[in-house]
Structure formats: structure tokens, C-alpha cells
């Protein structure tokens, strides 16, 4: 068990975390993302993984300019949402509250600018993603979109819009702080306001880092994260911490007393924040039978209790429980679907996959997608503890018998039963050719 002590004193993961956040802008397709991909490749090579490389691919780029919400008594501070189109619109401002489906049905948004909260009230039974709110506003006839943070602190939220078919969204979109948004609603609901976004939309290049450890078996456990982050902050929690944890797990797996029963393929994706472009491409390239399971780290280190979305795969939930019992450590297991990170393109194909995040009691993103997603919010202890638990989980899954796949029809049925399907259809995220066939 020496590997546990080594992991609890290792600085490999934390050093890489600092390396990533110090790059600055890691927006998909940016020079910073390229630097982060190369640094992650080199770090994996440095801890002993083999065949570490970066595989490039083209994406739709987006480069921030200036933006504004202009009102009769001055401008509201705002930031453009990535993949918003450039343009300016002048129209009545309509407050759509929390942006629940009924809020859009009740509002008159034809040729209006929609003001929508990022939050979801506690009484509502599911999370509503930013893009669902954006495209519901578009469907209702809105010509502009203002996304208001639900959390205090004068922090404007970011997050991309656009679809696979049309990577640049149809209407200009900005994020404003809770304080600015509430002030807009109080003073200017119903008034003519002007929304302006300047940006550039060049072609760009992203990439995927791959490396291997363990025996050269046909089937592998995939250990994944994403390297990119939004350009307004360090992207510490989302998701430098996830990639740093993957590196620490890799080091620990190589340092364990026992050898791995199966190959572990480490895959660190670019372009997660823009419609999961890296992981969708990866899922298209590989033979599903070559994957034993996927363990995706996104949002770890926010809190000491790890949260596992197991997507209806009972064998994955059982593995999490085994590890939690072995270490006497709490774990939150959620068997429901969560279609918003790099595990999802695999789940949609029926491949067993876990999303690992943190259970910190916050239904939203916390500091994520704001300027406050910085290194000072994280602790070495939390990263090390999580790496120990996930090292044991990956080794457990590598030793397990073949884990049964799910029929994509069953995954689609889960999405319907959990009321996630309507929003995914609105945003163009429904990954099935028909009502339940991939």
C-alpha cells in the first residue's frame, strides 16, 4: 500500500495544475489551449506513460472582442458568450426569470431581448442547461439573449452557444452578473435596450492528448478529462483540476504494488467547452468494444466528497461502492444521466462511463464559468484524496469482467423518463437518429 502514502505526498498533480492555470487563456482553438495540450502530453510522458502524443483536429474558432448592453441610463457590464455571433440588436428587454420552459411559454419574446437567470429553483426537478435556455429564447422569437448569474459576487457567467450543425449561434448573447441582471430587470424590463457583440470567428485547431499504461490488451479503461477552459479565467476547477487529477492517477497506477489487469488509456480532450468536440470525435474514431469503461474527471476538487454519475450502469455503481467501502470514504452515487461532459458521447453509444465531479451541495457550477475560477479555491489535500480513490476505482474496473453495454434505446428512455430529452432536442443535442435509436 505504499502507493497511497506516495500519492498523498505527491506534487505531480498539483504542479501540473499550477502549470495549466499559469498559461492563462486556454479557450478551445487558442494558443493557450495548444500549450496546455503539449504540457499535458509532456507531463504524462514524464511520469512514465507510453506513446504520449497530441492528435490535432480543426474546429470553429471564436475570439472575443468587446460587448455591451446599452440602456437609457448607461451600459451594464457584460461579457459575450463564446460562439455568439457578432452583431447589434435594439429591442425591448423581457425578463424571463429562471428560464424554465413555462417562463418562455408565458413571455412575449417575439423580436425582444431575453433576460434569463442561470439558476434553477430548488423545487424544479432537473437542471436546465444554459444552452437550453438560449435555444428556447430563440424558438420564442428573441433577437438577443442576456444570461444573468444566479450567484452574488458581481461575476458575469460565460459558456458557449451554437450547435454541431451551426457552431455560431443565431442571436447575440452575453452574460451579466446577478447584480447587473437584477438591476436591468428592475429598471429596464419592457424598455428598448441595445445589445452589441464584437468577435471574430476564424477556423482554428484543437487536439486530443493520448497515452497508455498497463498491459497492451485489446480492451482498455479510458481515463479522461478536458484541458481547455473559458478565456475569462484560469479554469482551475473547470477543468485544470480534472486533468491534474488524471496525471496524478496515472502516476499512482504506475507506482502501485500490483500490476494492472488491463490497459488504461489516458485521453485528455480539447474543445470540451464548445459542444464536446474532442470527445465526440474520439467516440466516432474508436471501436466501442475496445473500451472496458470510461472514467471522466470534470469538476473534481471542488469538494472532498466525490460525486459519481453512473448512467444506469449497475456494475459501475457497484465498483464505486466497493472503493468507498474499502477506504471508508463517503461517495455520492447518482445513477441518472448527465449529458454535459466528455463521458457523454460514449454513454450515448451504450458504453459504460462514469462522470466524476464533486458533491459540495451546490446545484450550479460554483465559481466555474466565471472570472473567479482560480487556483486559490482548491486544496492539495482534496486533489490527493480524490486521486487515491480514483486510482483504486480505475484499477478495480481494469480487473473486472467485461462490463455489459446498454442498448442506446435504454439510454434514450432514461433521458425521457428523467425529463432531459426535451431540452436536448431544443439544443440539437439529441444523439439518437430516432426516438431511441442511435
Image (cartoon, grey):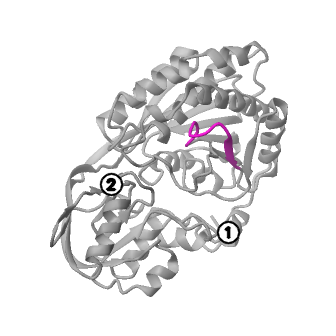
**Displayed quadrant of residue 391:** top right
Q: Which residue is mark 2?
A: 82
Magenta part of the chain: 299-309
Q: Which mark is residue 177?
A: none
- Disc 1 and disc 2: Cα gap in Å? 28 Å
Residues at circles 1 and 2 in contact by the CB criterion of under 8 Å: no
User: Is residue 144 covered in magenta?
Assistant: no
Asked whether residue 277 is in view, the answer is yes
- Viewer-proximal residue, 78 or 261? 78
Which of marks 2 and 1 precedes in the sequence? 2
Q: Residues within 10 Å of mark 1 (few under 14, many from 20)?
A: some
Q: Is residue 168 visible?
A: no
Residue at the spot x=33%, y=65% of the render? 181
Residue at figure coordinates x 16%, y 69% from the top left: 73
Q: Is residue 307 magenta?
A: yes
Q: Mark 2, residues whose alpha carbon is within 10 Å: few (<14), some, or many (≥20)?
A: many
> Could you tell whether 187 is left or right of 40 in the image?
left
Residue 62 % position (x, y): 28, 50
Q: Dot 1: what SS? A: loop
* Residue 15 position in % (x across, y down): 48, 20
Circle 1 sits on which residue? Answer: 418
In the rendered view, does 303 fall on the left or right side of 375? Answer: right
SS for callout 2: loop
Q: At 51% from the left edge and 75% from the top edge, which residue is drawn?
A: 100
Quarter of the figure that contains the C terminus: bottom right
Amino acid at each position: 500500500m505504499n502507493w497511497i502514502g506516495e500519492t498523498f505526498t505527491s506534487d505531480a498533480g498539483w504542479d501540473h495544475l499550477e502549470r495549466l492555470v499559469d498559461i492563462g487563456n486556454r479557450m478551445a482553438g487558442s494558443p493557450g489551449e495548444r500549450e496546455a495540450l503539449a504540457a499535458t502530453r509532456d507531463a504524462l510522458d514524464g511520469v512514465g506513460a507510453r506513446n504520449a502524443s497530441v492528435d490535432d483536429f480543426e474546429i470553429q474558432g471564436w475570439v472575443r472582442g468587446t460587448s455591451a448592453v446599452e440602456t437609457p441610463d448607461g451600459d451594464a457590464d457584460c461579457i459575450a458568450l463564446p460562439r455568439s455571433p457578432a452583431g447589434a440588436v435594439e429591442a425591448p428587454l423581457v425578463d424571463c426569470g429562471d428560464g424554465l420552459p413555462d417562463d418562455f411559454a408565458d413571455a412575449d419574446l417575439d423580436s425582444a431581448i431575453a433576460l434569463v437567470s442561470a439558476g434553477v429553483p430548488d423545487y424544479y426537478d432537473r437542471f436546465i442547461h444554459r444552452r437550453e435556455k438560449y435555444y428556447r429564447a430563440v424558438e420564442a422569437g428573441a433577437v438577443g439573449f442576456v444570461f444573468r448569474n444566479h450567484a452574488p459576487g458581481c461575476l458575469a457567467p460565460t459558456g458557449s452557444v451554437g450547435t454541431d450543425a451551426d457552431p455560431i449561434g443565431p442571436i447575440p448573447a452575453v452574460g451579466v452578473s446577478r447584480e447587473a441582471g437584477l438591476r436591468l430587470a428592475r429598471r429596464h424590463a419592457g424598455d428598448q435596450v441595445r445589445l452589441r457583440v464584437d468577435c471574430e470567428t476564424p477556423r482554428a485547431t484543437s487536439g486530443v492528448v493520448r497515452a497508455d499504461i498497463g498491459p497492451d490488451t485489446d480492451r482498455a479503461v479510458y481515463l479522461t478529462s478536458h484541458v481547455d477552459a473559458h478565456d475569462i479565467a484560469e479554469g482551475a476547477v473547470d477543468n485544470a483540476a480534472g486533468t491534474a487529477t488524471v496525471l496524478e492517477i496515472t502516476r499512482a497506477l504506475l507506482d502501485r504494488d500490483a500490476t494492472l489487469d488491463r490497459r488504461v488509456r489516458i485521453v485528455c480532450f480539447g474543445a470540451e467547452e464548445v459542444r464536446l468536440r474532442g470527445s465526440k470525435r474520439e467516440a466516432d474514431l474508436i471501436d466501442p468494444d475496445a473500451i472496458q469503461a470510461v472514467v471522466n474527471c470534470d469538476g473534481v476538487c471542488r469538494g472532498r466528497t466525490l460525486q459519481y454519475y453512473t448512467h444506469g450502469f449497475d456494475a459501475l455503481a457497484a465498483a464505486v461502492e466497493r472503493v468507498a467501502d474499502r477506504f471508508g470514504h463517503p461517495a455520492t452515487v447518482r445513477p441518472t444521466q448527465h449529458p454535459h461532459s466528455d463521458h457523454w458521447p460514449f454513454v450515448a453509444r451504450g458504453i459504460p462511463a462514469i462522470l466524476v465531479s464533486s458533491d459540495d451541495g451546490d446545484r450550479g457550477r460554483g465559481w466555474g464559468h466565471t472570472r473567479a475560477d482560480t487556483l486559490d479555491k482548491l486544496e492539495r489535500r482534496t486533489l490527493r484524496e480524490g486521486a487515491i480513490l480514483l486510482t483504486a476505482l480505475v484499477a478495480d474496473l481494469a480487473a473486472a469482467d467485461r462490463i455489459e453495454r446498454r442498448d442506446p434505446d435504454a439510454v434514450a428512455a432514461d433521458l425521457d423518463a428523467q425529463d432531459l430529452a426535451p431540452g436536448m432536442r431544443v439544443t440539437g443535442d439529441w444523439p439518437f437518429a430516432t426516438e431511441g435509436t442511435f
